Image: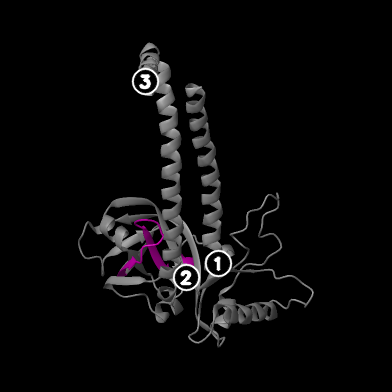
Amino acid sequence: MNLQSTREGVQIAIDALRSDKVRAFLTVLGIGIGVATVTGMGAVMTGVENGIAEDLEAIGPENFVVSRFDQTEIRVSDRPPWEGKPKITLAEARALGDLPSVGSVTPAVGGSMDIKVRGRDLSGVSVAGLGADWTSYSLGDFLEGRNFLPDDVARSGTVTVLSEELAKRAFEGAPAVGKQIRIAGTAFEVVGVYRPKPNLFEGGKPVWAYVPATTGFKHLPLDDDWVDLWVVPAPGYTQDQSMDEVTVAMRTLRRLKPAEENNFALIRQEAFADLIGRVTLAVRLVMTVLSGVGLMVGGVGVV
C-alpha cells in the first residue's frame, strides 16, 4: 500500500514537472543559484581571510606606518581627514631613524606616471620615491643588480629599481640592469630588478618602478604632502615599544602639548588587514542576501 502510494506520488510529481517545464526549470535554477552562491561565498571568504594572514607574515607583521592621517578609518564627514594635520617630512624620518627601538625608517611617496622604453610607452605605471632601506619593509629578492644606495639618495641620483613584471614588459626578457628608461620625461638608469614576496597588498604581478625619494621630489611630479614613513622595529623591541617611542618622538618634534591630540597617525599592518576584513564582511552580507533571494525564488516555485 505504501509502495503504491509512493509510486503514485512520484508519478504525479513527474506529470506536474512535464506539464509546466518553465516553472520547474526556474525552481531548480533558483535553488541551484542559492546553494551555489552560499557555497562559493564561503570558500572565497575563507580563502581571502587565510590569504590575509599569510600576507601579513610575508610583509612583516611587526612593521607599521607613520602617516599624515589614518588611512584605514572609514569616514562619513565632508571634511578631508588630513585637514589641520601637517605633512610628514624627511627631517622627521631622519629623527625617527635614530631611535633605539627603530631598525629602519623608509620615507615613501608614490604616483602614477608614464614610462618610455626604447620608443615604447608604458602608461599608468606605479612610481614610488623611497629611502634606501625599503627592502627591510617590502620583503623579496633581487633577480638582477642591486638596490639604490644611501649615496644615491644623498645625491638624488637618477637610478631606479624595477619590479620583475615591469622589467619583463619593458625589456621583453632581456637583461634590464644598465639600461635606461624615461620616467615622466627624465632618464633613469636601471640598477636592479626585484621580485617582491607575493601578498594581497601588492597584487598578483605588481608593476612598479622605485627611485630614491630625494630624486622623486627633484625630478618627478611626486607630491611631498603625502609622504608616509615605513617603520621596522629594531631587533629585541616589540611593535608596541617601537610605536610608543615613535609617538613620543613625533609629539616632541611637533611640540604638541600634553592635552593636544596627535596630528599624525601610526598604522599597524593589522589595521590594513582589518580594513580588508570589513570590506569582505560587506561582500559576505551582500552575497548572503543574493543567495537568500535565489533560495526564496526556488521556494516560491516549490510552493
Query: Which quadrant holds residue 36?
Result: top left
Give the amino acid at mark 2: Ala
Residue density around tag 2, few if under 14, some if 14–19, many if 20 or more, within 10 Å? many
As for residue 21 lying within the magenta part, the answer is no
Give the amino acid at mark 1: Val
Q: How many marks?
A: 3
Look at the picture and state if 75 lies above or below 244. above
Mark 2 and mark 1 lie on one chain; the one further toward the N terminus is 2
Query: Which quadrant holds residue 56?
Result: bottom left
Question: Which dot marks residue 213?
Answer: 2
Look at the picture and state if 155 lies above or below 16. below
Give the amino acid at mark 3: Val
In the rendered image, which residue does mark 3 sit on?
Answer: 10
Q: Which residue range is magenta in the image?
A: 191-219
Tag 2's secondary structure? helix
Query: Relative to the observer, which residue lies in front, 73 or 181?
Result: 73
In the rendered image, which residue does mark 1 sit on?
Answer: 227
Look at the picture and state if 188 lies above or below 101. above
Query: Relative to the observer, which residue lies in front, 239 or 81?
Result: 239
State which mark lies toward you, 2 or 3.
3
Query: Which quadrant holds residue 55?
Result: bottom left
Question: Which dot marks residue 296?
Answer: none
In the rendered image, residue 47, in percent from the top left (x then y), is placed at 41, 54
In the rendered image, residue 284, in percent from the top left (x then y), is placed at 52, 46
As for residue 203 lying within the magenta part, the answer is yes
Mark 1 and mark 3 lie on one chain; the one further toward the N terminus is 3
Q: Are marks 2 and 1 in contact (CB under 8 Å)?
A: yes
In the rendered image, residue 250, in percent from the top left (x then y), is placed at 65, 77
